[in-house]
Amino acid sequence: MNLDDYQELADKTVNVDVDVVDNCVIGLYGESGEFVDLLKKIAFHKHPIDSVVCDKLKKEAGDLTWYGAVLIKHYCKQSLHLCWAHDPDEQHFRDFSDIDTRIASYMRHDPAQLTMRTVRAAKAIMGSTSHVIAGQMTINSPEVVMQGVAGLYDCIAGTLSLFGLKIDDAARENIEKLRARYGEKFSTAASINRKE
């Protein structure tokens, strides 16, 4: 899925009656916590890695990508693909599949190291979220936020790859979920009465 198309589709489901940036800041913390909690259950509680867990990981990953994309649009006033413009090796990125492809080139699946890599991934997700948001819940400069979101997406893609999943699929399924819930525009009633 194209990064900028995703950003535009995500933006259609923004609640414009609230402070969008603050909503994204709180949302990034909340969703990263939910994502990391799933990783904790896999690594330390020895939950099975089945289709239910994989679907939950994709759902939370999709929610994280949504908050990142919306934050870049409303705070940084930039297109999502520009998050990678600072890196000469990545400035050509236009699609989520570009991130998946790069991650696949250096991630090696080793089941014996899954717990260690899962814990490392959880720490990276939280670190990337903290890179976006400075202390006392204030937000960093737009340039730092853009680099932080790029790093967050890399961490999400790397984590998903441990379980045979792709950030491209998570982003696509996120938009499908939001379209089913809201149609073309956010609605408080639809948010309150949602099925999931």
Image (spheres, helix red, strand yellow):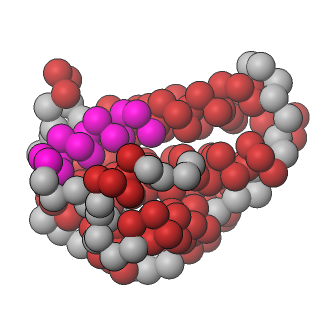
Q: Is residue 26 magenta?
A: yes
Q: In the image, residue 171 lies at what x, y percent?
A: 51, 65
Q: In the image, residue 41 lies at what x, y percent?
A: 71, 26
Q: Nearer the viewer, residue 39 or 111?
A: 39
- Magenta stretch prevailing secondary structure: helix
Q: Residue at x 12, y 46 (%)?
A: 19
Q: In the image, residue 87 lies at what x, y percent?
A: 34, 64
Left or right: 56 in relation to 69 = right
Q: Residue 79 occupies which quadrant of the picture?
A: bottom left
Q: Residue at x 77, y 19 (%)?
A: 45
- Look at the picture and state if 170 lies above or below 56: below
Residue 3 visible in this rendered orientation of the protein = no
Q: Is residue 185 magenta?
A: no
Residue 27 visible in this rendered orientation of the protein = yes
Left or right: 143 in relation to 190 = left
Q: Residue 75 occupies which quadrant of the picture?
A: bottom left
- Look at the picture and state if 57 lies above or below 112: below
Q: Residue at x 59, y 28 (%)?
A: 37
Left or right: 11 in relation to 165 = left
Q: Residue at x 48, y 52 (%)?
A: 194
Q: How many marks?
A: 0
Q: Nearer the viewer, residue 182 or 151?
A: 182
Left or right: 160 in relation to 96 = right
Q: Which stretch appears magenta?
A: 18-31
- Look at the picture and state if 133 lies above or below 136: below
Q: Nearer the viewer, residue 10 or 147?
A: 10
Q: In the image, residue 184 lies at what x, y percent?
A: 33, 76
